Image: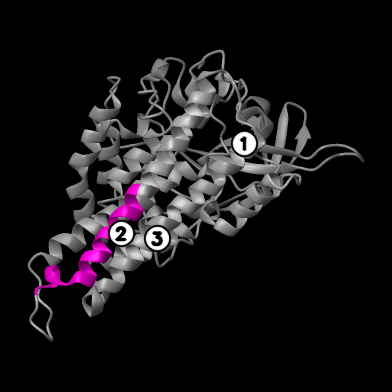
Amino acid sequence: MAQAATAISTVRMTREALLARAEALVPMLAERAERTEEERRLPVSTVEDFHRSGLFRALQPARVGGHELDYGMLVDMAAVAGKGCASAAWNLSNLASHHWMLAMWPKDAQDEVWGGRGERADTLISASVIFPAGRARKVDGGYLLSGRWPFCSGVDPSEWIMLGGVIPAVADGGTTDYRLFLVPKVDVRVHDVWFTSGLQGTGSNDVEAADLFVPEHRTVSADDVKGDPTPGAADNPAPLYRVPVIAPFPYVLSGVAVGVARGALDGFVDNLRSRVARYTGARMSDLQNVQIKVAEAAALVDAAHLVMRADCEETMAIATAGRAPDMLTKAKYRRNGAFSAGLCVRAVDLLFQASGGGGIYKRNPIQRAFRDIHAVSGHIAFNMDVAGTTYGRLALGADPDNPTL
């Protein structure tokens, strides 16, 4: 559906200015957090706030009115917004990342979504890059795509959707093609299934298509977005658009984990400054075990953010040098993304346990942080067993187990 009329920021902004706008939204996001859960999607007012602030355009090409900031901006702005509302931060980073991805598509596809001069550059794009969920076959002029894809976060305010699909090898010795497809939302069926315990407001519903024709210009192979020049490179030559799509994918979302943990830590500290233990009357802030937990949680979150930023800066440096990262480096991004998100989970768990019985009341934001951080960690990108296996195989000389890296 089209967005409500709103004054949208089109002035190219610096990282610092955009993060300041994100910080200014945190109190409002926190105030709306319960409502966001109840609606099971982003409130229209939050979508409009993200548009007005320019945050959705953080990684969009400057030629269509975007800010064209470095890849690590996805981590940083989600880490800020996540202090107020995990669901809002999740959709913010997701939807912003799809502007970055679209810049790698053929220009005809970009123009179809954004307009030739960027007159529709505020159009939002949802996605489910789950390749095995879809099957496609080549036909004259394009592909026929079928499947049912879960976890299409932010599908409600979006007008387009990126979907992963597999094109099986047509003959012995042929290769399987893992491909991304860009389709109008009106061409698919949305299933309202998002009833969850965490990240309740992301609206990550299922979408379904049956023999949907997708023209050639609205598809790219996973092989085309692994770090070499992409089909969109002639129009968007900046290094940002050479960063691989799949390898550093955890960093599209991992900033949410940082934000949730930081928000939980800030709330815990503020609450305990004036709180006394009910059974002993001691000031909670004077208890050594509580002080140690605060210190450990803070260290875990800081360490996680440092790991995330370091990898994002490295992948930008490699892209700027005109190279693609080698396979072990790509696997490292998957490993580090999962590991660093796990540090944030550990931080929230420490604080939740230290909150005692008061932490289970719905009026206490720590219970939402606990639910949300575990929902974040349930994403396949943050599964350390999966990421660790891929890295370990390569480190030990075996073949990779992920064909899309």
10 vs 405: above or below: above
Q: Which residues are magenta?
A: 283-302
Q: Nearer the viewer, residue 119 or 280?
A: 280
The amino acid at mark 2 is Ala
> Do the numbered discs 2 and 3 sit on residues whose CB atoms are within 8 Å?
no
Q: Are marks 1 and 3 in contact (CB under 8 Å)?
A: no
Neighbourhood count class around disc 1 (C-alpha, 10 Å): few under 14, some 14–19, many 20 upward: many
| Dominant secondary structure, magenta | helix
Q: Residue at x 38, y 42 (%)?
A: 306
Q: Nearer the viewer, residue 293 or 377?
A: 293
Asked if residue 103 lies in the magenta stretch, the reply is: no
Residue type at mark 3 is: Val
Q: Which residue is mark 3?
A: 345
| Residue visible at 28% across and 24% down in the picture | 14
Q: Tell which circle, 2 or 1, labels the residue nearer the N-terminal end.
A: 1
Colour convention: one colour
Q: Could you tell which of marks 1 and 3 lies nearer the N-terminus?
A: 1
Name the element at disc 1.
strand
The quarter of the displayed image where residue 58 is located: top left
Residue for badge 1: 181
Residue 35 location, quadrant: bottom left
Q: Secondary structure at mark 2?
A: helix
